[in-house]
Image (cartoon, coloured by chain):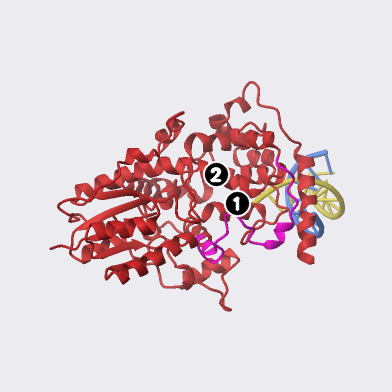
Chain colours: A red, B yellow, C blue
Amino acid sequence: MTSPSIVWFRDDLRLADHPALRAALDRDEPVIGLYVLDDESPGIRPLGGAARWWLHHSLTSLAERLRERGSTLVLRRGPAEKVVAELARDAGAGAVFWNRRYGQPERDIDAALKTALRDDGLTAQSFAASVLFEPWTVATGSGTPYSVYTPFWRACLALPTPREPLPEPLSIPGVSKAPPSDDLESWELLPQHPDWAAGLREMWEPGEPAARRRLHEFLTEDSSSYEAARNTPSAGATSLLSPRLRWGELSPHTIWHESVQAGVGGMFLSELGWREFAWHTLFHFPDLATKNLRRDFDAFPWPTPDPEHLSAWQQGRTGFAIVDAGMRELWQTGYMHNRVRMVTASFLIKNLLIDWRIGEEWFWDTLVDADGASNSFNWQWVAGSGADAAPYFRIFNPELQAKKFDPASRYIAEWAPDHVSDSPPPQIVDLGETRKAALQAYEAVKGASRR
DNA sequence: TTTTGGTTCGG
DNA sequence: CGAACCAAA
């Protein structure tokens, strides 16, 4: 009589460097992989449209890889705590393993489930796999979370080096009769009417094998130009690994160690550091997506958003070339170059005076790489309300940014060709005036913090 | 991961 | 008169 192990996959859709899967294999019982689509548990943020597209394909890949190795992926939908416990009971499982999540609603679910499973006599165990340093292991001398990046990352680097990645298992024993699974198609994760995903299909191949290929391509071919060209959006110098990390097709440990081995360090690893900083910040401030981290920003007098301005921004017809190019790249590919993310976000907040949360929601819906921490963390960084944020008065000028980082208009020509040829859309605001208005609005925050 | 506007300095 | 530098936002 077997008592299978359940590996509950979440934001870790891979087989390599998967501590929960490793623990299941070490237990020497058949393994059932499980993914739960949970749009119901309290506090869980439903996935955006681009994320659902990615998830569909990454799950397809993961299921195939588990099958090749002898196991299976069971798909279930509903409140995770209930769904996982149900499957454990129905499958006669003896153990459930998962890799940790760090958002508050997710932690609440996982903690409650762990207790319930253990009360039923099962093994329930969680592992560190999605961040290099767990949030409770990094604190200032006085025990508070870091609020400035440089000392935060220095403190991380002073900790023991993150563990080496675990090898990918070649064989994963499965159960003889797999428990019932939803049909992935029934989740309707792919856009239908209309199908807006053509650009995503062209740019991305979700799944662990493609993720590993891209990592090696970056480390062997592209990384030498990274530091010099990372800010040039047309250069193709960035790693494009963000969605791989978001979905856990690669672990940060794998990226860390393979980068070090390839002699890629400094700036690139520091970007992993910002990702860590975002997750640690979310751990300590669970409301990061909705509440100003610096509460004095609650005094910021956001005007009623102009719906025309907002949709011009969303659709890339603000009349400012690099903004329009970025917003169209985002819509078509589910991705935007980091430099342009800063410019488009700054434009929404500081030239259109639209609340950062509205921009955050749009990115959440359209990016394939938006995770629970980085998206809101970075929007707050641009707004000036976040951790180690850009000072509010740091207002990007989209025309200057284009001149500096896209001098030959190559990026603009690729994504917004109308801006380099016939008739660009008219500019919807005056940069000088809106800049002045934003600085004036900032006075309210300064007044509030002095009080 | 900034911009602007002012001043200074060399040609 | 432009480049370089700096303070303030």
**Pointer 2 and pointer 1: residues touching (CB < 8 Å)?**
yes
The C terminus of chain A - image quarter? bottom right
Q: Which residue is mark 2?
A: A363
Span shown in magenta? A279-305
Q: Residue furthest top?
A: A422
What residue type is disc 2 on?
Phe
- The front one of A146 and A300 is A300
Chain letter for the residue marked with disc 1 in the picture: A
What residue type is disc 1 on?
Trp
Q: Residue furthest bottom?
A: A142
Give the image location of residue A46, x and y in percent. Answer: 48, 48
Q: State yes or no: residue A155 in magenta.
A: no
Give the image location of residue A175, x and y in percent. Answer: 17, 54
Q: Is residue A318 left or right of residue A10?
A: right
Q: Which mark is residue A379?
A: 1
Q: Earlier in the sequence, mark 2 or mark 1?
A: 2
Q: State yes or no: residue A304 in magenta.
A: yes
Residue at 39% x, 38% y is A188
Chain letter for the residue marked with disc 2 in the picture: A
Query: Dot 1: what SS?
Result: helix
Name which quarter of the figure residue A423 lies in. top right
Give the image location of residue C9, x and y in percent. Answer: 80, 54
Q: Is residue A327 left or right of residue A78?
A: right
Residue A6 at least partly seen: no
